[in-house]
Image (cartoon, coloured by chain):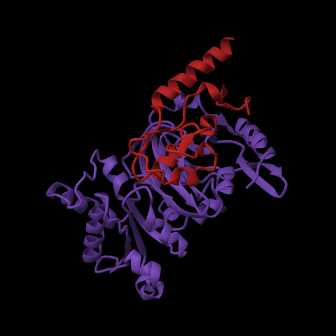
Chain colours: A red, B purple
Amino acid sequence: MSDETFMGVPREKIPWFPTIDYSKCDFCMECDKFCPHQVYERREGEVKLVVAHPEHCVVFCRACAKTCGPDALSFPSKPETIELIKRLREEGNDG
Amino acid sequence: MAERFAVLPCNGLDKAVGPLAREIALAVVEACQGELVCPVLFSNLPARYTKALELPLIVIDGCGTRCATKLAVGHDLKVTRKLQVAEALKLMGESAGDSLAPDAERLALCRLLTERLLSAPEEGTALDSEAAFAEPVEYATVTHDKFIFRIPRQGYLFNENHCWARVAGSRARVGISDYMQQELGDLTFCELPEVGTEVGQFDAVGSVESVKAVSDIISPVSGRVVAVNPAVAETPEIINEDPYVHGWVAELELHDLESDRALLLEGEAYLALVRQKAADYRP
């Protein structure tokens, strides 16, 4: 849905989602099995898993990273994300 | 005589963190004269451990794959305490390294983690707080099909991660909302933060685990953990039954409530959010 918001900010403006380090990922699919929000999608070929729907990721949730044996998942900085949300909220109020 | 435990550890032999889980398991069993449950034999012959599993159970996972936890959950075992070694090391700024044979430094870390695991969870000083948090709560409800979601009308602040903070003086208790507990379903485990931990706003302040999923508890407020609720670690179902009062998870000495508040919802606004979510709620 394009009208999804988080804390009053359009979700697509908040870059909070996992990044897969393919040098570590062993495609065990635990994160995909775990995540109830269909952030990940499986693919045929060499890269068997991608972050297909970053906008489905719950802002501030990093729970999938805990399921990752090889520690291949990373998230953006939380303080920076909070600052960004505050700024976007102020811009939204001004505009 | 210390309390005795059964210990179900990770059996990972091909990753550096596996042998560390093994060291900790052996040390725990020795220290409390407990029973070791071999995950491989238990998978094949669970009856072998019927007697051992009458003891309260400690599960020790090596890495995030959580094989030992999954095995315990798959056999309906009640987990009393648990440790995930890779995560615990990370929190200490350490790692398991690359070697399958633990060095002296790692063995020392194992001893530290063993002690922590065996020391009873600290209950902090929740004493004065009991009265402060004893005010009765009045609820509003959102109904959708056969689902009813309760939201306290006053005295609670929420974030959009469905976690709440109830403020009393300079402290707040935090927990998960009725909506979140219903979405997760029957809880099987609640991981508490350690007393003394500094928590930023929107940091995880523990986690809850159900048969469906694991979810971080995202703290609406910043502060230092001064008490935790051992009852929900012992009996996570309390959170399902009473998420807003007896199901509190941690108590924080607040750092900057006024700044935190700018990013939180009052009861009325959270009610509107739940109403919107409930419209397309599918458990």
In the orientation shown, which residue stands out farthest toward the left?
Answer: B104
The answer to whether B112 is drawn above or below residue B235 in the figure is above
Q: Residue B130: x, y in percent?
A: 52, 55
Q: Residue B206: x, y in percent?
A: 48, 51
Q: Where is residue A15, by image quadrant?
A: top right
Q: Residue B152: x, y in percent?
A: 70, 47
Q: Quadrant of the N terminus of chain B?
A: bottom left
Q: Residue at x 57, y 36 (%)?
A: A59
Q: Where is residue B161, by image quadrant?
A: top right
Q: Is residue B277 left or right of residue B145?
A: left
Q: Where is residue A88, by image quadrant?
A: top right
Q: Residue at x 60, y 38 (%)?
A: A52
Q: Nearer the viewer, residue B242 or B93?
A: B93
In the orientation shown, which residue stands out farthest toward the top?
Answer: A95
In the orientation shown, which residue stands out farthest toward the front?
Answer: A45
Q: Nearer the viewer, residue B127 or A92?
A: A92
Q: Is residue B181 left or right of residue B143?
A: left
Q: Nearer the viewer, residue A22 or B50?
A: A22
Q: Is residue B263 left or right of residue B272?
A: left
Q: Residue B231: x, y in percent?
A: 51, 64
Q: Residue at x 47, y 57 (%)?
A: B191
Total labels drawn: 0
Q: Quadrant of the C terminus of chain B?
A: bottom right
The answer to whether A56 is drawn above or below residue B84 in the figure is above
